[in-house]
Image (tube, rainbow, N blue to C red):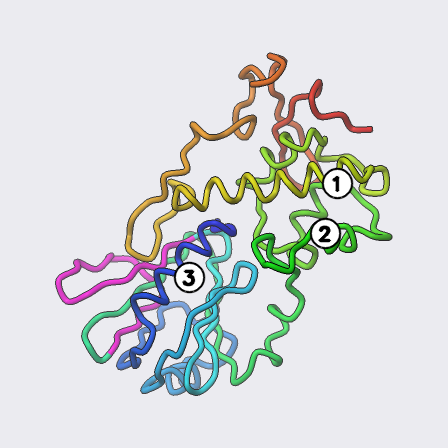
Amino acid sequence: MAELPEIIVISNQMKEKIKGKIFKEVEVHQRKCLNCSVKDFVSSILENRILDVSFLGKWFLIHLERGFLLINLGMGGDMVYFNKDTPLSKKYQFKFLFEDGTGFTIRFWWFGYVHFVNNLEEHRWTRQIGPSPFEPSFTFDKFLKIFQGRKGNIKAFLLNQKNISGIGNFYIHDILFEAKLHPLRKIETLREEEMRDLYDAIKRRLKLSLELGGADYELNFLGERGKFTSDYFLVAYKEGKDCPICGTKIEKIRTGGNFSFVCRKCQKSN
């Protein structure tokens, strides 16, 4: 599943490759991903020019002369650019072709979303998204305000896209490890210095992956893989291995509806 580093990489590549182009053909092979009928979707996209590409949370926003095309890769998928000489993937749910013969395909690993809206205000999924850690306005003071009066465990809070956008299960384990916080630690017990450590860890881990082009299991818009490999993991997915700080065995524990990788010595739950 693409998280913030991958979203930024793909968004920037899309802007470079498809900004200014006009849609000529649209193929839809999975209509349940749409927020309208296939007929309405295709008619809204055809002959429409791309003005810009941006992102909001895990949504790609393609700004059109008339409306917005919004894409969310859901539980994972590939969105790959092609030109006249590029062999197309045999499996895809959507294909968009431009007037110059280039285009891109979308292949969901499981399920995703492709929406068209006339204006963003009518799109309820993106209206509720929290701030991105890379926004200039994402200061430590703003970070503290997000947590004010909130309760629950820290991992669930960070994974909720309504609070902070772009963090998922791929990066959360090492973010919490760097901050020395157990995933089940209660928000209301955090001290300000711990909040500072968490804020810095979020920025640091996501920046590292971004500088490496994102995760290596994800294809970017050019069909290439990122260089953030498992070699950069601290405790994530390293059950039974030694903690890089204290040598304690890393454990895989259940935290709600998912699992976490922790060092019980370095990451205290209270």
Pointer 3: what residue?
A: 11
Q: Residue at x 46, y 81 (%)?
A: 37
Name the residue type under label 1. Answer: Met
Name the outermost residue toward the top.
247
- Give the structural element (helix, strand or loop) at label 1: helix
Which mark, residue 143?
2
Report the amino acid beneath label 2. Answer: Phe
Q: Position of residue 260 (x, y in %)?
A: 63, 32
Residue ranking furthest to the left: 85
Q: Are marks 1 and 2 in contact (CB under 8 Å)?
A: yes
Instruction: Please state, as top left, top right, bottom left or bottom right, where the C terminus lies in the image.
Output: top right
Relative to 97, does residue 44 appear above or below in the rendering?
Answer: below
* Image location of residue 258, percent across then percent down: 63, 39
- Residue underneath mark 1: 195
Disc 3 crowd, CA 10 A, few/some/many (<14, 14-19, 20+) = many
Residue 24 vertical position relative to residue 109 in the rendered view, above or below: below
Circle 3: element type: helix
Q: Separation of disc 3 and disc 1 at Cα?
A: 30 Å
Instruction: Give x and y (percent) for residue 176.
Output: 65, 34
